[in-house]
């Protein structure tokens, strides 16, 4: 059982830094989740002469994701964790037999898939500090095709972070990340702040990606209230004669979510998680290449189609396997 030491108990200077603070859940080793986004409308505007505008209604949008992670190296001075994931997202439109817009027809016929690995490297120090690096390698798109090499679907994101843990209830860090969280490939600063400020309450934040308030109701029940940014880039082919010479296009997608999350222990290592919230769309755009800035501007993007998705409610249910409690006993 975790405890919060008040007044705060300082870490010893001769002990290698452990970034985890009191009150955090045990890490999840294996997870299988199902997500459903409620009905919403989509509006698309073409920025090129050879495509038209479109609009439609999505009646069914679901995501299934499987992931696991396992420690590979666990030494005082160096730790390495490997993770794997596969996700599959489907769209079902209203009156699919009469869809007349190429983007919607392609989403109806195909799925947005992501298959990837991530590597987390941790270098603890003895002066209450640490250095961490994460690297993600993902294959995103409709890559079950023989006409395009898998390298076209590879998305790489990475970022280093330096952090400090003054005591067992506080950790903060600074870094940056190159990622597709906002749809487009971009470099952004990161600020981590984890603070357990009472035996039951804490804050977990990795800005600008996520921030949540944690309530440890008891040892087997943890509640969260927060917000997160999610996004990705997928290589896709549209079924449109006007795009026959383009083997792949980039579908850029990002959103902000406000959510409430309950994580409940079923039996020691087996947990269930239920999340419900509201999704705000940031972008759902098509680009011709991975690097699509306008020639006249560093900040503006050159999209051939820009889409707006109506905001919608969603829910997510997942089963999680965690390390047994006995592994964390002193």
Image (spheres, rainbow, N blue to C red):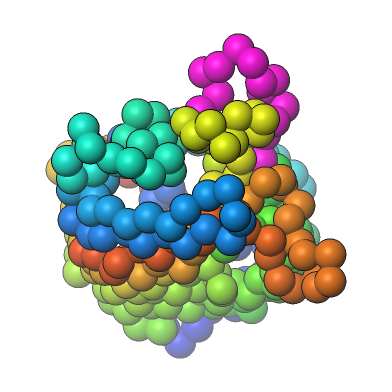
Task: Please give the name of the residue rendered at 53% of the width and 49% of the height, measured from the top-left corner.
Answer: 51
Q: Taking 277 as reference, is 173 left or right?
A: right
Q: Taking 107 as reference, is 248 left or right?
A: right
Residue 198 in picture, x, y percent from top left? 35, 83
In this view, the residue farthest toward the front is: 49
What are the residue bounds of the magenta stretch? 136-155
Task: Please give the name of the residue rendered at 74% of the width and 73% of the height, measured from the top-left corner.
Answer: 299
Residue 318 in picture, x, y percent from top left? 25, 43
Residue 155 in picture, x, y percent from top left? 66, 40
Q: Quadrant of residue 23?
A: bottom left
Query: Is 62 inside the magenta-drawn segment?
Result: no
Q: Quadrant of residue 180?
A: bottom right
Examine the rendering and report whether any part of residue 68 can be seen. Answer: no
Task: Please give the name of the residue rendered at 41% of the width and 84% of the height, measured from the top-left corner.
Answer: 197
Q: Quadrant of the N terminus?
A: bottom left
Which is more toward the observer, 152 or 288?
A: 288
Query: Is 143 inside the magenta-drawn segment?
Result: yes
Which is more toward the observer, 202 or 17?
A: 202
């Amino acid at each position: 059982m975790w405890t919060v030491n008040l007044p705060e108990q300082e870490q010893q200077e001769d002990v290698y830094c452990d970034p985890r603070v009191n009150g955090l859940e045990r890490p999840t080793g294996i997870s299988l989740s199902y997500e459903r986004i409620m009905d919403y409308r989509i509006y698309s505007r073409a920025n090129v002469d050879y495509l038209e505008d479109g609009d439609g209604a999505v009646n069914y949008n679901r995501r299934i994701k499987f992931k696991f992670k396992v420690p590979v190296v666990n030494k005082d001075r160096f730790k390495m964790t490997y993770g794997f994931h596969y996700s599959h997202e489907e769209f079902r439109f209203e009156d699919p037999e009469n869809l007349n817009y190429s983007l919607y027809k392609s989403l109806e016929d195909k799925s947005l898939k992501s298959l990837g690995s991530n590597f987390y490297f941790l270098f603890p120090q003895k002066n209450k500090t640490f250095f961490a690096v994460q690297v993600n390698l993902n294959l995103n798109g409709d890559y079950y095709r023989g006409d395009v090499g898998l390298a076209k679907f590879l998305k790489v994101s990475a970022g280093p972070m330096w952090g400090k843990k003054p005591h067992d209830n506080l950790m903060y860090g600074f870094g940056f990340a190159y990622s597709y969280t906002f749809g487009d490939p971009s470099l952004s600063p990161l600020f981590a702040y984890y603070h357990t400020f009472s035996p039951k309450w804490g804050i977990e934040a990795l800005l600008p990606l996520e921030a949540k308030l944690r309530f440890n109701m008891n040892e087997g029940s943890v509640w969260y209230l927060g917000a997160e940014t999610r996004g990705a880039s997928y290589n896709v082919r549209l079924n449109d004669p006007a795009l026959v010479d383009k083997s792949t296009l980039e579908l850029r997608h990002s959103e902000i979510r406000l959510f409430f999350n309950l994580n409940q222990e079923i039996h020691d290592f087996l947990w269930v998680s239920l999340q419900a919230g509201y999704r705000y769309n940031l972008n759902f755009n098509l680009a011709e290449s991975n690097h699509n800035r306008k020639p006249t501007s560093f900040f503006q993007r050159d999209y051939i189609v820009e889409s707006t998705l109506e905001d919608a409610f969603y829910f997510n249910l997942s089963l999680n396997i965690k390390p047994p409690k006995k592994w964390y006993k002193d």
